Image: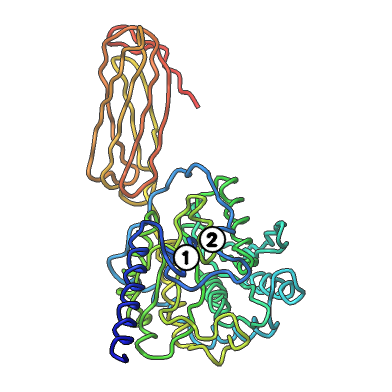
Amino acid sequence: MKTMIYRKNIIGKAFVVLIISCLLLIPGYTFAQTPDVSNDLTPHRPAYIQGKQDLVDVQVPRLLSPAHPLPPIRANVDIVELLQQTDESLILGYLENLTSFGPRVTGTEACNQSAQYLYQTFQDMGLSVRFHNYTDSTVSGSNVEATLYGSDSTNIFIICGHYDTVAPSPGADDDGSGVAAVLAAAEIMRNYEFYHTIRFVCFSGEEQGLIGSYHYAQDAYSNNETIIAVLNADMIGFALSSSDGSRGKIYENDASEWIVSYTQDISELYDEYIGIELIPQGESWGSDHYYFWQYGYDAVFYHEYNFNDYYHSAEDTIEHMNITYSTRFTRLLLATLAEMALQPRPVLKVSSLTGGLGITSVVTNVGEVNASAVNVTITVTGGVFGRLDVSSTDEVDVLAPQNSLQSKAKLFRIGNIQIGVTARASNADHVTKHATGFLLGPFVLKLVITP
């Protein structure tokens, strides 16, 4: 009898396993899984929302993508000088000041006092500072932005972190570590001149659903700002072992993969001061980089390798951080940001567009460094019955500063025409110029430049 019952139990269990297996094979059927986390491997996420479905769905055309800075091929003594100034006492001092306010929930007095501290600290550095205030249906708050203007460029590079916390937490690692990195970068870089503009931004409203960064990215998009890269640091200070302390995570979308490669190159070039291997993780919606993606900007999210055991708790304190690791991670961000902001780029300009026997354009590199893989394309459409459609392209491997490339398009038709000239380079923003004219045989008459 016992043997029969045992066999029946075995048969019954096998039947249950079979049914479950079949259900799991049905497309779309899963257990213990929600749509908002299925493609997100990081447990890091805002505390006061249920999931990604609670975030704003942004649908906007992508802004014109500017050229990326080229990765460095050798260490720069100026960058080494910056890294040598980034020490543990600097990071620890900012962490102690920030955590002294206690939990910094957006909308509370402690959070407002923290914002005032950040504002005053940036102002004491001699930077241009402002509150970026926002009002949302959930909460109102302020982001704090400090700007170090570029010597000859309006292109913007951003380093950021969030200064708000959850209710019970002093937020040493989440995200005092990221804010300390932002403050340290500002303190050190303010004494140097950079070609491009740098912004040091501290967000609030992150734990309520990335609210501060949503409004910030939205306003940047509305103002047509040229943000080249956003370096978001969120929890970069927890490492229990030397193995954890030698690695870090980075989250990226397809458009931002170049920042991953760039940072990895920086890590190798300055390994003596950084000593962190950066491991790509793919996409994540769980921090302030996300809405920059939504508005078409390139951004990455830097994160500690071993997730903090004290996340979103009263025990997220300095005592549970690894300040050495946090300092080295800060150096990684600082070196990446500084290399990007130092680098001048070629600037192409359509300096001349004339008619006569065909169309002649002159493109000049008015920047300070060589333009690489330059090509200039002249397109002409129109003519009688609109049947004219001509394109002519000229290329050159290198266009030195103040040098020009002349291109010519030969035509033979009659009628009104529309002319476009586009100049591109692998390391410069592309430029265009448009004109109208009248084509009489091979001659272009009445050429007029249009906006």
Q: Residue at x 53, y 75 (%)?
A: 178
Q: Does 84 sit left or right of 225 as displayed?
A: left
The percent coordinates of residue 39 (x first, y second) are 41, 63
Q: Residue at x 36, y 47 (%)?
A: 428
Q: Which residue lies furthest to the right in this view?
A: 109
Q: Mark 1 points at which residue?
A: 37
* Type of amino acid under label 1: Val
* Type of amino acid under label 2: Lys
Residue nearer the viewer, 164 or 152: 164
Q: Name the residue under label 2.
A: 52
Say if mark 1 contacts mark 2, CB within 8 Å.
Answer: yes
Q: Which residue is drawn at 53% across and 56% down?
A: 291
Q: Does 311 sit left or right of 364 as displayed?
A: right
- In the rendered image, which quarter is residue 27 located in? bottom left
Q: In this view, does 45 lie above or below 88?
A: above
Q: Quadrant of the N terminus?
A: bottom left
**Which structural element holds mark 1?**
helix
Tell me the number on the disc at residue 444.
none
- In the rendered image, which quarter is residue 411 located in? top left
**Which structural element holds mark 2?**
helix
- Closer to the chain start, of discs 1 and 2, is 1
The percent coordinates of residue 10 (x first, y second) are 30, 82
Tell me how far mark 1 sits from mark 2, CA to CA.
8 Å
Crowd tier of the residue under label 2, counting other residues whose Cα lies within 10 Å: few below 14, some 14–19, many 20 or above: some
Q: Which residue is drawn at 45% across and 43% down?
A: 64
The percent coordinates of residue 94 (x first, y second) are 60, 82
Q: Residue furthest front?
A: 1
